[in-house]
Image (spheres, helix red, strand yellow):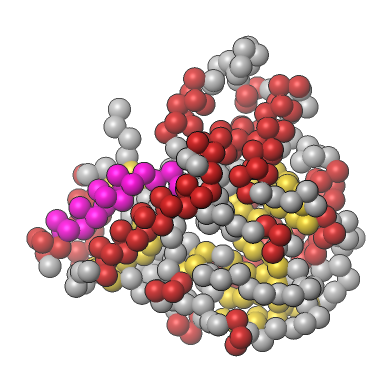
Amino acid sequence: MTRKYNFSAGPAMLPQEVLEQAQTEMLDWNGSGMSVMEMSHRGKEYMSIAAEAEADLREIMVIPDNYKVLFLQGGASTQFAAIPLNLLRGNDSADYVNTGAWSKKAITEASRYCSVNVVSSTEDTNFTTVRPYESWDINPDAAYLHYVANETIGGVEFSFIPESGETPLVVDMSSTILSRPVDVSKYGMIYAGAQKNIGPAGLTIAIIRDDLIGNAMDITPSMMNYEIHAKAGSMYNTPPTYAWYLAGLVFKWIKKQGGLEGVAEINKRKSDNLYAAIDNSEFYKNPVDKEFRSWMNIPFTLANSDLDDEFLGLAEERGLVSLKGHRSVGGMRASIYNAMPESGVEALIDLMADFEKKYG
């Protein structure tokens, strides 16, 4: 069997080593006589899997003791509502940064529960940059400041951490988490859907500072109340057990790569090489301000959009799949998360060079 290079924005590639281990353990985990999918989430076998996964995540991200780590369901999109429900704490306003499609969805959802102050928006640039923090219209009395670290559709990524002072900083890290070291202590809350760098779809991770838990609005559903999940160790109901288990295998794989420092070195090299192929060509273009280019999601257009289907067809023939860009941006998009090997990026660069030679 030949594995394809999957450039999808998510669900994304998983490390082959992780998939092979899961395959080996599919029918019998650690001599238990059961698949992980069959285990009670409250049984000693599964409880050990869950505890080890959390411990490994805390280790690789250096998560301080005064933060809870929650393994939830519903994707990052559910958190768009859960965040104001839990973090407004009697306040009636929150600050949001608008840098793309996912920012807009978070803003729309939060607007159901509070007054949203959009401190900065780059919609007028078609979301190709991030405005300097000094230009933001900050409300010092806001309950929190929310931003999306990386917009998967536009390929725009923050190159700095906003300085929010006493205002809790909340970040959607769905597409950048575990791609490099991060100072967790600078945030009130970090959340991320799993299906890019963590594991399969179905799992969401939330890392929340203790003092922000326990003040949910009365209307908050139990399944969206951080305090309930924290007190139950993410076992208030049946969690996404198999996705949690696979995430644990990914955490161990990251440790084998040299932790987040080792992973970051590889990711930077992959993105640098692909951007160089784009920038050194007259045939391909990336629209994003260079300072805010994403490491993870790299959109690019061809000089002649009529050739898009031809490019995608040749890519498929070479085992490079899911390269079609989002309809709002057009062209191509290469998502090169942790599990995308350098050989996959090299294969894409070779394809681009061959295609330009033929059609450029």
Magenta segment range? 338-355
Residue 65: in sight, yes or no?
yes
Residue 106 is left or right of residue 93, and the answer is left
Q: Residue at x 21, y 44 (%)?
A: 317
Residue 331: in sight, yes or no?
no
Q: Judge whether residue 55 is colored magenta.
A: no
Q: Judge whether residue 341 is colored magenta.
A: yes
- Using the image as rendered, state which of residue 69 and residue 220 is in the foreground: 69
Residue 251 is situated, as x and y percent measured from the top left of the image, at 57, 39
Q: Residue at x 47, y 47 (%)?
A: 262
Residue 250 is left or right of residue 1, and the answer is right
Residue 71 is left or right of residue 226, and the answer is left
Residue 58 is situated, as x and y percent measured from the top left of the image, at 68, 44
Residue 61 is situated, as x and y percent measured from the top left of the image, at 63, 49
Q: Residue at x 86, y 43 (%)?
A: 231
- Using the image as rendered, state which of residue 352 and residue 103 is in the foreground: 352
Relative to 302, is 77 above or below? above
Q: Residue at x 76, y 22 (%)?
A: 44
Quadrant, the N terminus: top left
- Using the image as rendered, state which of residue 90 and residue 133 is in the foreground: 133
